[in-house]
Amino acid sequence: MRILLTGGTGYIGSHTAVELLKLGYDVELMDNLFNSKITVLDDIEKITGVRPAFHKIDLLDKVGMDELFKNGRYDLVIHFAGLKAVGESVKKPLKYYENNVGGTINLLESMKKYGVKKIIFSSSATVYGEQGVAGLTEEMQTGVGITNPYGETKHIIEEILKDVAEAEPEFEATILRYFNPVGAHESGLLGEDPNDIPNNLMPIIMKVAIGEISELSVYGNDYDTVDGTGMRDYIHVVDLAMGHVAAIDHMKPGVSVYNLGTGRATSVLEMVAAFEKESGKKLPYKIAERRPGDLAIIYANPAKALNELGWETKLTIEDAMRDTINYLDKKFKTRA
Ligand code: WQD
C-alpha cells in the first residue's frame, strides 16, 4: 500500500511516518516546510533506516499537486497539512480558510482525478466547540460554539468529507479528532519544533525550560477544576501516530470518526509538576488572566477507537515529559 502523508515533516506527520516505515509501508511525504524543517527527513532515516521520498509542494499549488498525484500511484492519503495556531487564526481568518479548506479541496480534487479513494484526516477536538466537555464521544454535536477560525476549518473539512462520501460511494474517509498531542520520539531525534510562535502549553513549557521564554503564564486558576487551572486530555504523539496505523486497517466506504485521546484530563499545574519531576528543575510560572475562548475541562471518551480499531493509549504524561526533555537535550544540547 502506497501512502502519501501531507504535512509529513510536521510534528504528528513525522512521528506517524516513522511508525509506518517501521511496519514496512511504502510512504511518501509532502510538505511546504512552512512550519517544519527538511532535516526531519534525516531524523526519520536515522530512526528507521529508510529515507522516504519527499515532495516540497504547497496544497495550494494546483499544478504541483496534479503532477504529484499523476505520478504518485497512491492508495491512501493521510492528511496532516494545515495551519494550526488558534490565536493566529483569529487574526488572519482568510489565511486559515484559504490554506486549510482551499488546500484540502485541491487535495480532494487531485485524489478524485487520479482515483485515490481513501483519506485519513487530522481533525481536532476543537470541532466540539462548547458542547459537553466531560468525556467527549463521537456522537456529540460538532460545529456549535467553535471559538476560532482554525476550529471552524477543521469542522468545515469534516463536512466536506461527508458530502464527498455521499456523492462517491467508493470514497473512504476516516476522521481522527486529536485532543492535545504532547511528547517526542524516544530517540530524542523527533519532537515538536514549530517554526512559528507556539500558543500550545507544551511548546511554551519547552521554551521556558531552555530559557527562550522567562516564565510560563498559567491562563487562569479560578476554573472549577482540581486546582483551578485548565484541564486537557494530553496524548503522547507516538500513541497518536499508532492511532493512524490502527485506522488504516479499518478503512471502509463512507465516513468513520474516532476521538484519539487518553480519556483522562490533566491540569496545567499538574503538567508543570510532571515536567519539574522529570527534569529535576523548577519551571518558573505566574498565574495570569484566563485566555478568551478557553474551556475549563476537555477530555475524550476513547471507547469507540478501542472497540472498533483495537487502539488505546499506552504512554503516560510522565513518558511524554521524559521524552520531551530527552528531545530538548539532544536537539538543543541544553539540559532542560
Ligand atoms: C492547554 C491548556 C490553556 C498555554 C489547542 C487547540 C486544539 C489542539 C490543541 C490542534 C489550556 C493552558 C496554554 C499557556 C496556559 N490543537 N495554557 N498557558 O487550547 O486545549 O487546544 O491545542 O488540533 O485544536 O484548540 O491547547 O495547549 O493551547 O492549552 O495556561 O501559555 O494550557 O489555558 O488550559 P488547547 P493549549
Image: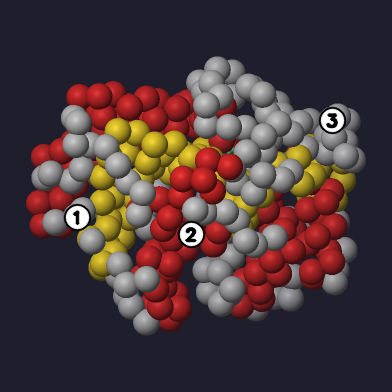
Q: Nearer the viewer, mark 3 or mark 1?
A: 1
Tell me, yes or no, whether the two marked residues, 2 and 1, touch with CB atoms within 8 Å: no
Secondary structure under the numbered disc 2 in the rendered image: helix
Q: Please say whether residue 281 is visible from this viewpoint.
A: yes
- Sequence-wise, the earlier of marks 3 and 1 is 1
Q: Residue at x 46, y 50 (%)?
A: 309
Q: Nearer the viewer, mark 2 or mark 3?
A: 2
Q: Please say whether residue 294 is visible from this viewpoint.
A: no
- Which labelled disc corresponds to residue 242? 2
Q: Residue furthest front?
A: 307
Q: Is 96 left, or right, of 74 in this rendering?
A: right
The amino acid sitting under disc 3 is Tyr
The amino acid sitting under disc 1 is Tyr
- Sequence-wise, the earlier of marks 2 and 1 is 1
Image quadrant, ligand 1:
top right
Tell me, yes or no, whether the two marked residues, 2 and 3, touch with CB atoms within 8 Å: no
Give residue 311's position: percent from left, percent from top.
52, 54
Q: CA distance from mark 2 to mark 1?
A: 20 Å
Secondary structure under the numbered disc 3 in the rendered image: loop
- Which labelled disc corresponds to residue 223? 3
The residue at which mark 1 appears reads as 74
Q: Is 15 left, or right, of 119 in this rendering?
A: right
Give residue 104's quadrant in the image: top left
Q: Is 254 left, or right, of 13 in this rendering?
A: left
Secondary structure under the numbered disc 1 in the rendered image: loop
Q: CA distance from mark 2 to mark 3?
A: 33 Å
